[in-house]
Amino acid sequence: MQETAQKPAPERAYEAVIAKIRVMIEEKNLGPGDTLPPERQLAEIFNVSRHSLREAIRVLQEKGVLAARQGSGNYIQSATRGDLMRTLAVSTNTGSRRALEIFQLREIMEPQLAALAAEMGEARHIEMLESILEKQGQTTDGIELRKLDHEFHETLAAATGNATLYELAQNINRSLLPPKTKIYDNRERQVISLEGHRKILDAIKNKDVEGAKAEMRAHIARVKSTVF
């Protein structure tokens, strides 16, 4: 029986708007500090609803591409034009296939990263991770939990002492879903995330290299099961 290729997930309205914003930035050669046209004008230029436009702008603000300036609308805040275009490239390639690819990358990389953190991590890293988990256990807010989840994994990468791994972990976090932090609003996902993080940290505190690797592998598998 011949297998049928999996169809990509349909593009959501705000993703199409992000793609249009990217084209505008490229064509007008806009860069850090430049201001986008007002929302009403953008909606007319792109022929989209104000709702879809605002959702796209919100996502780009979360990713650090845009920022709001009082009385002046939205401006580009990426550090360099290169950073801007890399982040926009990621933002216009989302959807279920992209998410699956990100998880596959994490399954390969993060167990080894956790193992290296257990071997190389210092007391200051453990203190930072413990502080993150304390905050994680005190909130159910999706936006805050997304931020703390990213901080946990980036701090773990910092604990390896490898600057390239740390930079890669940051790039992965910037690529992660979701708009409106839907998976972070899921209570089951919140509990799974916190429990997984605690087990990983316990292994790192005990300098248990193989244990940290195994706990990270199990953690990613559990989180993945709540997304797909």
Image (cartoon, rainbow, N blue to C red):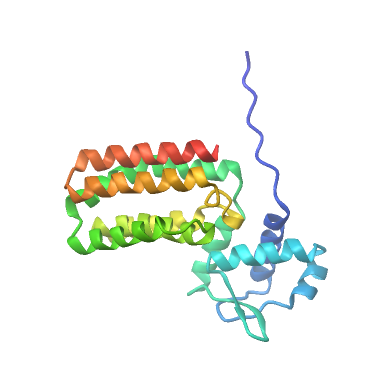
Q: Residue shown at 65%/39% (left/top)? A: 8
For the image shown, how many numbered marks are present on the structure?
A: 0
- Up/down of 221 relative to 184, above or below: above
Examine the rendering and report whether any part of residue 42 can be seen: yes
What residue is rendered at 58% in x and 68% in y? 61
Residue furthest to the bottom in view is: 71
Above or below 3: residue 17: below
* Position of the N terminus by quadrant: top right
In the shown orientation, is residue 33 left or right of residue 45? left
- For the residue pair 106 and 183, the one nearer the viewer reads as 183
Question: Residue 91 location in percent, x, y?
Answer: 58, 57
Q: Is residue 131 left or right of residue 59?
A: left
Residue that sits furthest to the top in the current view: 1
Quarter in which the C terminus is drawn: top right
Q: Residue 21 appears at what percent x and percent y?
A: 68, 66
User: Residue at coordinates 38% horizontally, 55% vertically from top-left?
Assistant: 169
Classify 197 as above or below 72. Answer: above
Residue 137: give x, y in percent of width and height: 40, 55
**Residue at the far front in the pictured view:** 138
Image vertical order of residue 81 relative to residue 109, above or below? below
Q: In this rendered view, identify the residue nearer to me: 13 or 3.
A: 13
Query: Which image quadrant for residue 170?
Result: bottom left
Q: Is residue 168 visible?
A: no
Q: What is the quadrant of residue 217 in the picture?
A: top left
The image shows residue 39 at horizontal and vertical percentages of: 75, 74
Instruction: Identify the residue at image location x=55%, y=51%.
Output: 185
